[in-house]
Image (spheres, rainbow, N blue to C red):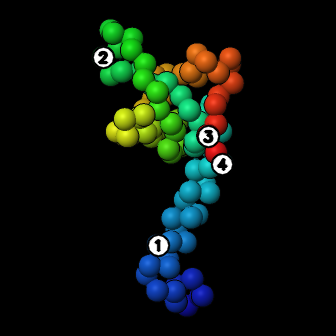
Amino acid sequence: MDEFQRKPAPVRELVDFVRQMLKESAIESEFHIGDTVEVQDHDTTMRLYFGAQISRVHPDQTYDVMFEDTTEELKVAERRIRIPNDCDGAVANNI
């Protein structure tokens, strides 16, 4: 039994979680965790965009976002996300 297998379950879970987060952070994507963006509403006929922040990047190039009103949407397609108009082409990063 190696050292990792002897660790208590919570420690193993934490190590697995950290490894997964590091793996996800290496994904090449247009947006990154902490970026301030605008997300198009589900009703695409209205073309409304709402301010949000990227909270997670998935390998399939979808994103979890936290809106300004603190609601969260998971697995948002990249085509529904854009850089805010007031950023002059650069993604605002609130880190």
Disc number placed over residue 26 in the picture, else none: 4
Q: Nearer the viewer, mark 4 or mark 3?
A: 3
**N-term mark: 3 or 2:** 2
- Sort mark 4 into few (<14), some (14-19) or many (20+) by Cα contacts within 10 Å: few
Q: Which residue is mark 3?
A: 94
User: Residue visible at 43% across and 81% down?
Assistant: 9
> Disc 4 marks which amino acid?
Ala
**Between discs 4 and 3, the one toward the N terminus:** 4
Task: Give the numbered dot on residue 13.
Answer: 1
* CB under 8 Å between discs 4 and 2: no
Helix, strand, or loop for circle 2?
loop
C-alpha gap between disc 3 and disc 1: 29 Å
Q: In this rendering, does residue 32 appear at all? A: no
Q: The C terminus is located in which quarter?
A: top right
Q: Which tag, 1 or 4, sits closer to the chain's start? A: 1
What type is the residue that disc 3 sits on?
A: Asn
Vertical position of residue 58 compared to residue 91: above or below: below
Q: Earlier in the sequence, mark 3 or mark 1?
A: 1
In front: mark 1 or mark 2? Answer: 2
First along the sequence among labels 1 and 2 = 1
Q: Which mark is residue 43?
A: 2
Vertical placement of 11 versus 68: above or below?
below
At a point 58% along the width and 50% down the height, the residue shown is 24
Compared with 79, 20 (above or below) is below
Residue 3: where, in percent of width, then height? Answer: 60, 88
